[in-house]
Amino acid sequence: MDIQELNKISPLRVFDDAINGGLGKGNLGVIVSRHGVGKTACLVHLATDKLLRGENVIHVSFSGNVEHVMNWYKEVFKEIAEVQSLDDAHNVYASILANRVVMNFSQTQISIEKVLSSLKSLIEQGSFAADAILFDGYKLTVADEEDIVKIREFAKEMNLEVWFSVSPVNPDVVYDEYGVPNTLAKYYSYIDVLVGLRYQEAIDKVVMTVVRAHGKEVPKPMQVKLDPKTMLISH
């Protein structure tokens, strides 16, 4: 199978349809769940799909472990390539790496202004025309609302998508049926797409639910599943 065929049959096309064709440039998307459910793997699968479609991605890790993130990309690509019998997988992977940059910042030690300034320098002075930025492990539920406004303005100014992976910080959090914590509610006005992840023991799958799409509640939320072994998104 070649890349064009792979992209066409990807389960992420179902996900794109559920959010009206995709997140879209200038918009913020959030993937949220309890710790350890699979947000980073999900984020990496989204990023890998973009890379395979020729888009440029900046993965910003706030966890302090860049090597861990890079290993996720290797594993996710390997699983995709093997499951779909991708032609010339080794060279395909080498080629998409040129479209990805991984960075690391500390949310507590570096201001969002400095993070965004570094990203802007990479895009403009480093000639890396990013299409999407992933904020992996960003503690959104305790962030200042002004910081979220600045990130949103940056996304619009630079004409790119921004995806967050988020887990609550405080222990006394109430989750809804889709795995979305109540501490996220005050940020809804800034979030264009909200996706909840929740492990369902009865089917031994992580269920990925689109809860909000472009400012509106989804009356019949779309759900796709993640394989708990590979953490890949599936139909």
Image (cartoon, rainbow, N blue to C red):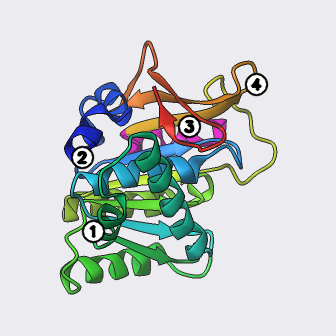
Earlier-in-chain disc, 4 versus 2: 2
Report which residue position mark 1 lands on.
95
Q: Magenta stretch: residue 191 in it?
A: yes
Would you place residue 96 above or below residue 180 in this image? below
Report which residue position mark 2 lands on.
2
Among the 4 quarters of the image, the one containing residue 155:
bottom left
Specify few, some or many for label 4: CA neighbours under 10 Å numbering under 14, 14-19, or 20 or more: few
Residue at the image point whose x is 69% and y is 20% from the top: 203
Mark 3–mark 1 contact, CB under 8 Å?
no
Report which residue position mark 3 lands on.
185
Give the foreground label among 1 and 2. Answer: 2
Report which residue position mark 4 lands on.
201
Marks 4 and 2 sit apart, C-alpha to C-alpha, by: 35 Å
Earlier-in-chain disc, 4 versus 3: 3
Give the foreground label among 2 and 3. Answer: 2
Q: Is residue 164 visible?
A: no
Would you place residue 15 above or below residue 3 in this image? above
Q: Main SS type for the magenta part?
A: helix
Image-based side of 211 in relation to 156, left or right: right
Specify few, some or many for label 1: CA neighbours under 10 Å numbering under 14, 14-19, or 20 or more: some
Marks 1 and 4 sit apart, C-alpha to C-alpha, by: 38 Å
Marks 4 and 3 sit apart, C-alpha to C-alpha, by: 26 Å
Earlier-in-chain disc, 3 versus 1: 1
Marks 2 and 3 sit apart, C-alpha to C-alpha, by: 42 Å
The number of discs equals 4
Image location of residue 135, percent across then percent down: 47, 61
Give the foreground label among 1 and 4. Answer: 1
